[in-house]
Image: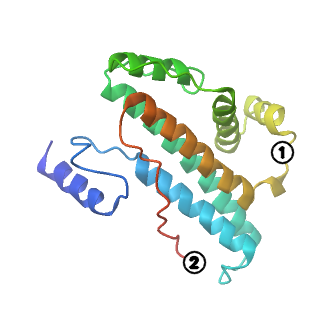
Amino acid sequence: MTAAEASVNVAVSEFSSGWSMELHPGPFNPTPVLFRRGMAAADSARRVASGEKLVVANPRAREVDDCVIAILLCHAAVETAWHWEQLQANVKPRHWPDEFQKGMTLVAGAYGRPEQPTDADLSKELLDLSAWRNFLQHGDERARKRLEDRHGPFRPEALNAGPAAAVVETSRNLGNYIAEVSGTQRLFDTNWIDPLAD
């Protein structure tokens, strides 16, 4: 690690809740940053929807923005954690999200830990989160069809504080499952929010 990389890691560790240089030496894992920013966006959406956040020119547009940000960042946090644990275990990363379980099975095997299959609810949460992310980020016909199959036809009013809060819990559940399988620090077990600027 170069001196510059070490400096960045130390600086990040000083403000990253859940990040410990002692437990995670070496390359920087951005998972906690992505998750905390997703939580902050969901919290902002909640505050706008409740009228608590009053200094907003267009509250509805801000709530939509915050919901989209929460979905994309929470999805990114889970996918990053999943890839990170495979790389740390010297496992060739599998295809996301279809081989989520296969990747975690290989990680558990690499550490000599028992296999812990995901339950039906957790698998559904992963596919729901991925459907939203693919729709928002790609928007092609396949992504639209996948979202419609899981959530019904898209309606703009669906992008609100409710789904924003739900994806935080989904990513927390998935992230804690990843940590349980790999035996690493639970980077998603935080409620600390650095609020987004009004």
Residue sitting nearer the eye, 162 or 159: 162
Residue 97 image-quadrant placement: top right
Q: Amino acid at mark 1?
A: Phe
Q: Secondary structure at mark 2?
A: loop
Question: Is 171 left or right of 11, judged from the image as shown?
Answer: right
Q: Residues within 10 Å of mark 1 (few under 14, many from 20)?
A: some
Looking at the image, residue 54 lies above or below residue 35: below
Q: Position of residue 1 (x, y in %)?
A: 15, 42
Total numbered badges shown on the rendered structure: 2
- Disc with the residue nearer the chain's start (2 vs 1): 1
The residue carrying mark 2 is 198
Q: Secondary structure at mark 1?
A: loop
Which disc is residue 154 wearing? 1
- Residue at 32% x, 21% y is 111
Rounded to the nearest angstrom, the CA distance separating label 2 from label 1 is: 28 Å
Looking at the image, residue 143 lies above or below residue 155: above
- Residue at 51% x, 34% y is 177
